[in-house]
Amino acid sequence: MSLYEEQFKNYLKNNDLKYTNERKELLKAITILKDHFHVEDIYQQVRKQKSDVSLATVYRTIPILIESGLITETLSEGDKIVYEKIYNEPRHDHMVCLNCGKIMEFSCPGMEKLQKNICREHSFIPVEHRLELRGYCRNCWKNIKQKINNGKYNQELK
Amino acid sequence: MSLYEEQFKNYLKNNDLKYTNERKELLKAITILKDHFHVEDIYQQVRKQKSDVSLATVYRTIPILIESGLITETLSEGDKIVYEKIYNEPRHDHMVCLNCGKIMEFSCPGMEKLQKNICREHSFIPVEHRLELRGYCRNCWKNIKQKINNGKYNQELK
DNA sequence: ATATAATTGAGAATGATTATCAATTGCATT
DNA sequence: AATGCAATTGATAATCATTCTCAATTATAT
Ligand SMILES: [Mn+2]
Ligand SMILES: [Mn+2]
Ligand SMILES: [Zn+2]
Ligand SMILES: [Zn+2]
């Protein structure tokens, strides 16, 4: 039994929740998914596993996966929420390109330290943080500069 | 004419947009609103001004207010988005209490510097950032500790 | 005053998420 | 292994914030 499964089953047991086939499939799905994913990605992955888990159950299970420390809500793009695995994964924050939507990861221990100081100063007990840098990735910025030089920077970028 | 109005009218003119009565009322509304507010707060404020601006127009105007640099999308609580004024206001970030929802502000120049460095390292051109610390405010944490001591920390906190 | 493109309100539509509820199932206990 | 029961599920309806549609209105350049 993987550490992932161990962690999940422990959480379920401690909360009088059952380890159902659907939850087994959903656990498998997120272990397979890479990087950042949407609710719909999870749903599509269980379907690839030839399982009939309903979308309602996907939604119902997400809070459990979060509570059990396996995934987290990373950021929201428009109305869709982006999730990712966090169990045994290194902490990190995100840069999002405003043009192509690419998500890049980085980590910065110095920043964490500053955050802790600030919390102490305000008697605030931190549980989690979310830092999102929005701007333009190398490629998109190159394209934008080009269009500006050609006088084509009217309305649309893409 | 206030700086606020000046800024707004300039933006409108530069983009072939009209300075309508509805936009006048909405501008007035956000100058009156304090701190962090929701779409519904803006709508309620224009109604207090005895104006019949429709909710659709409130939604339509928000992107314009953002584009013209008057307000910004600060954070999202659940499905509702929280806005605040930024014109001539000092930059800052937010702490949100997971128990009572209180939003506290802070600023940290050191953090801004680190962010710039990271962007440079990744050839990322930053436009804006959003940092949100989630945890428990002084009061809520005090209550929580008390309940733990009394063995009452079963499910609900509040 | 006129022309024209932008704007508006009302209400329909969208789309992600949540709630409902009868049928099913995991699992602790005989 | 059979029983009992609370937890779970799928199907589908409901929510609710936001966006879209379109005919009627309005701001602004000339
Ligand atoms: Mn990530
Ligand atoms: Mn603020
Ligand atoms: Zn990009
Ligand atoms: Zn609090």
Image (tube, coloured by chain):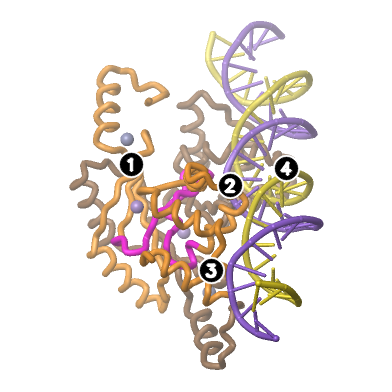
Chain colours: A orange, B brown, C purple, D yellow
Q: For disc 4, does the CB lie below 8 Å from ligand 2?
A: no
Give percent across and percent down for residue A19: 54, 66
Separation of marks 1 and 3 at Cα, in angstroms: 29 Å
Q: Which mark is residue B51?
A: 4
Image quarter in which the C terminus of chain B is found: bottom right
Between disc 1 and disc 2, whose residue precedes? Answer: 2
Disc 2 packing (10 Å; few <14; some 14–19; many ≥20)? few
Q: Secondary structure at mark 4?
A: loop
Q: Are marks 1 and 4 on the same chain?
A: no
Q: Nearer the viewer, residue A24 or A108?
A: A24
Q: Which chain letter goes with mark 2?
A: A
Quarter assignment of residue B52: top right
From the viewer's perspective, is B27 left or right of B109? right
Residue furthest out toward the bottom: B150
Q: Are marks 1 and 3 in contact (CB under 8 Å)?
A: no
Q: Amino acid at mark 4?
A: Ser
Seen in the picture, residue A17 relative to A57 is either above or below; the reply is below
Q: Which residue is mark 2?
A: A52
Q: Which mark is residue B102?
A: 3
Q: Which chain letter goes with mark 4?
A: B
Give percent across and percent down for residue B82: 54, 54
Separation of marks 2 and 3 at Cα, in angstroms: 41 Å
Q: Are marks 3 and 4 in contact (CB under 8 Å)?
A: no
Q: Amino acid at mark 2?
A: Asp
Q: Nearer the viewer, residue A61 or B78?
A: A61
Q: Amino acid at mark 1?
A: Gly
Q: For disc 3, does the CB lie below 8 Å from ligand 4?
A: yes
Asked if residue A1 lies in the magenta stretch, the reply is no
